[in-house]
Image: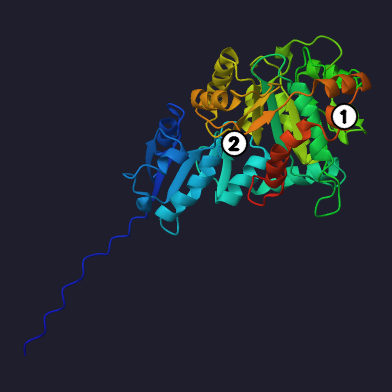
Amino acid sequence: MTLPHPAPSAPPRQAAEPQQTRTLVVSDVPGTAEQVAKALAQDASLTVGHRETSLADLARVPSVDIAATDLIIFDIRVGANDDLEALQTLRDMGHSGLKFLGVTAQTVTLATARALMDAGVDEVIPMTSIAPVPAQSEDVEQPQEHSAQRHGGDLHNGLIIAMCSARGGVGATTTVLNLATQLAHPQKNDAHGKAPRVAVIDLDIQNGVLGASLDLHDEGDVMDWLQSEVAPREDFIPRTMKTFDAGGFDVMPAPLAFAPLDILHSDMLAALLDDLRLAYDYVILDLPRAVCEWIDAVLIRADRFIILTDHSVHTLRQTRRLIETFSDEHPSLPIEVAVSKDAKTNNTAAALKEAETFLDRKIFHWIPRDDKSARRAADAGVPILVHRPRSPIARALTPIVTTLTEAQSSSTRRRA
């Protein structure tokens, strides 16, 4: 009898190697992506690559195989709306399981965190937590609840409008006050039956006269805060803002005492602007002509940045310098140019075309002179549009007001 040969034993089954997460680190700051990638490479569950580019530029590189990537870790550029748009493009290029992790070396404001979450970012963590850590963004609700308590449960999602002048005498402070009057009055009631809350902030802390032109003066609170070199206290805004009833808006005047521009620091101003955004529907900033260290806090947060100029050659050169300076570090900054206090002549159309060619951008706004009304308004201590609502200035500001009110009510813009 022939015994059957035993079946050959199967080779021992090798344990399947755990699948690695294909990770791509992205930052346009030299060395940052490489540094983060090296730290993450110590995790055996990750395969890590890096690129020195922004998220927006990554979406334009056809050679990048996003479909072969499981996790994109990117450096958050606050205020870079093109990065938010790139998120959807990259998600469409990748597979259904593609995740996005945003990291930052700075404190992430509620507005930034919310905008990132709405755009599809899965987690937001500080740069110090280089490895992906789950649920880092859950506490984002706590600042909102805390802010709601500070403002009596009434939270706004304010639009921040910054205004500066390319030279002295083009009427930045005058335009700020007239714009505030327009915003506070034409749209008297919003969808909820409430008048819009408008704040005007004089950031020319050295030579600002905005408050004085309305006979409103700082009582020492602004200077005390500047000298403290810390973020404003919870009661700072209600204690410092002065209500200008005739215009329907609130004002934070510059300090009475002479204050050097460098007494203000970026983190101080950032905290103030974030709190103002929650307290008001519109926050208009009257900036000094000097380019200060703390201007970055404004550039990051501004929803509109308006430069006032005229069409003279030397002023246009300065305007272009400002545009290049501000947009170099913040390419997505929405800069608009407005010609102010320039009389229109037969040569205006040709001059405007030349100015647009030189600046490489359209000039949509021309704010005329109204010297007679300006003198009478100054004597009365009110903005021109309070003294004379039908001034040509009102008609010139209407397109700006329209775009701002549409932006403020947009459901797709970044939220505070």
51 and 256: which is toward the camera:
256
Judged from this view, the residue extending furthest toward the front is 346
Image point (59%, 36%), residue name? 79
**SS category of the residue bearing label 1:** loop
Q: Position of residue 384 (x, y in %)?
A: 84, 27
> Does the residue at mark 1 contact the one at mark 2 (Cβ under 8 Å)?
no
**Above/below status of 81 relative to 17:** above
- Give left or right: position of 173 versus 291: right
The label shown at residue 20 is none
N-terminal of the two: label 1 or label 2? 2
The amino acid marked with disc number 1 is Met
Residue 11 seen by the camera: yes
> Residue 174 vs residue 53: left or right?
right
Residue under label 2: 79
Residue 241 is labelled as 1
Q: Disc 1 and disc 2: Cα gap in Å?
A: 26 Å
Residue 355 in the image: x percent, y percent?
54, 23
Asked whether the viewer can see residue 134, the reply is no
Could you tell me residue 209's position as x and y percent? 82, 16
Q: Please identify the quadrant where the C terminus is shown.
A: top right
